[in-house]
Amino acid sequence: MDRAAAMPQEASQEGPPGLEELLRRVARGDEEAFNRVYDLISPTVYGLVRRILRDPAQSEEVAQEVLVEVWRSACRYDPRRGSPQAWVMTMAHRRAVDRVRSEQAASDRDARAAAAGTERPYDEVAEEATNTLERERVRRCLDNLTEIQEQSVRLAFYGGYSYREVARLLSTPLGTVKTRMRDGLIRLRDCLGVEW
């Protein structure tokens, strides 16, 4: 009889089972043990996840995923590798970081898709037609210049010659070439209707 009376005392001295014992019970499918694990660790899991994600709704979702993972994988907890709290917090941290990466990847994909959608396709025919019209317009305006203005501008802009080289090629003083080129460019600007 002493023995029977002593057993309840020993049980009461043990106190409630710790997280490690609860995880062993959860691994065997004990729902009540899981409820206690949930009550013990869910606030800490949510707090960690919330610090990483900052969004309350996503934090709740990820915390629930972690707790479901605890239910499913309790049998994989190995006390030799760390405390039960550390095991759960490692899962929570990984899940939260995975969510951040997933959200970033989705955001990057959306940005690339939006950028690709705004690019205008290159139309070679339209581009060539525009270039032909521009060349014809410049040609007409060049025809309105004096002979030395036209020669100076053509040699400098189409031939790539410097003022000094243009003066030598045209056998004209450098100052005269500079003046004629300046005047020719002013007339071209006015003819083309552009500002420089």
Image: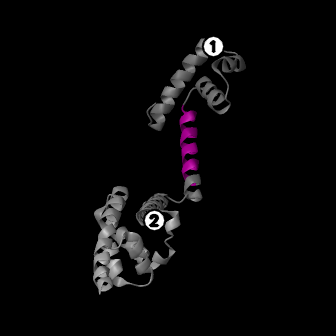
- The label on residue 87 is 2
Task: Give the residue at x 44% y 63%.
Answer: 83
Which residue is more in the foreground, 140 or 82? 82
Which residue is more in the foreground, 99 or 47? 47
What are the residue bounds of the magenta stretch? 129-144
Q: Position of residue 162 (x, y in %)?
A: 65, 22
Q: CA distance from mark 1 to mark 2?
A: 85 Å
Is 53 left, or right, of 157 in this rendering?
A: left
Query: Which of the 4 image quarters holds residue 92?
Result: bottom left
Is 137 left, or right, of 37 in this rendering?
A: right
Is residue 140 on the magenta stretch? Answer: yes
Q: Which residue is mark 1?
A: 174
User: Which amino acid type is shown beneath numbered disc 2?
Assistant: Trp
- The label on residue 109 is none
SS state under label 2? helix
Q: Position of residue 90 (x, y in %)?
A: 45, 62
Above or below residue 1? Residue 53 is: above
For marks 1 and 2, give the one nearer the viewer. 2
